[in-house]
Structure formats: C-alpha cells, structure tokens
Image (cartoon, rainbow, N blue to C red):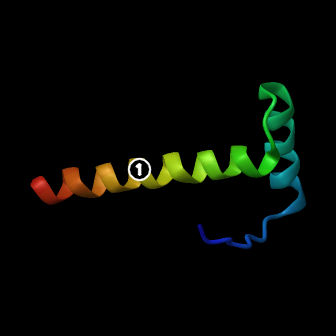
Amino acid sequence: MKTVELNVEDYLYAFYAKVAAQVGRSTEQVMADALFRFAGEAAAGAMERARK
C-alpha cells in the first residue's frame, strides 16, 4: 500500500474530524472513504457519459 500526503484547509479537516468522532473512526479513514466514494461516482458518471 502506498502512503499519500494531502494538504487540506483547517476548516475542512475540522469538518471531517467531527464526522469521524460521530462514527467512531479516524479522521484519515473518513476522508479516505469520502475520496473513494467520490472516485467511484466520478467513474460511474464518466462511463455513463461514454455510453451516450
């Protein structure tokens, strides 16, 4: 597995930290999950546009 460093604004990190606290996960895991979901949705959208 590769490690990636991501620079985000303090307010954005604070948002994900609050979400993470509510679901009992680390901030980094919540951010990774959100990015993974976004990537999947973006790929699905690109595939749908390619079909048309």
Q: What kind of element bears circle 1?
A: helix
Counting from the top left corner in percent of width and height, residue 9 is at: 83, 63
Counting from the top left corner in percent of width and height, residue 13 is at: 84, 53
Q: Furthest-left residue in view?
A: 52
Q: Which residue is mark 1?
A: 40
> Closest to the observer: 25 or 47?
25
Q: Is residue 11 above or below residue 19?
A: below
Position of residue 52 in the picture relative to residue 41 (left or right): left
Place residue 15 in its image quadrant: top right
Position of residue 20 in the picture relative to residue 47 (left or right): right
> Which residue sits at x=30%, y=51%?
45
Residue type beneath disc 1: Gly
For the N terminus, give its image quadrant. Answer: bottom right
Position of residue 44 in the picture relative to residue 38 (left or right): left
Q: Is residue 21 above or below residue 39?
A: above
Q: Is residue 34 above or below residue 10?
A: above
Q: Residues within 10 Å of mark 1 (few under 14, many from 20)?
A: few
Counting from the top left corner in percent of width and height, residue 50 is at: 16, 60
> Which residue sits at x=89%, y=59%?
10
> Which residue sits at x=39%, y=54%?
42
> Which residue sits at x=71%, y=47%?
29
Counting from the top left corner in percent of width and height, residue 18 is at: 86, 36
Place residue 23 in its image quadrant: top right
How many numbered discs, if any? 1
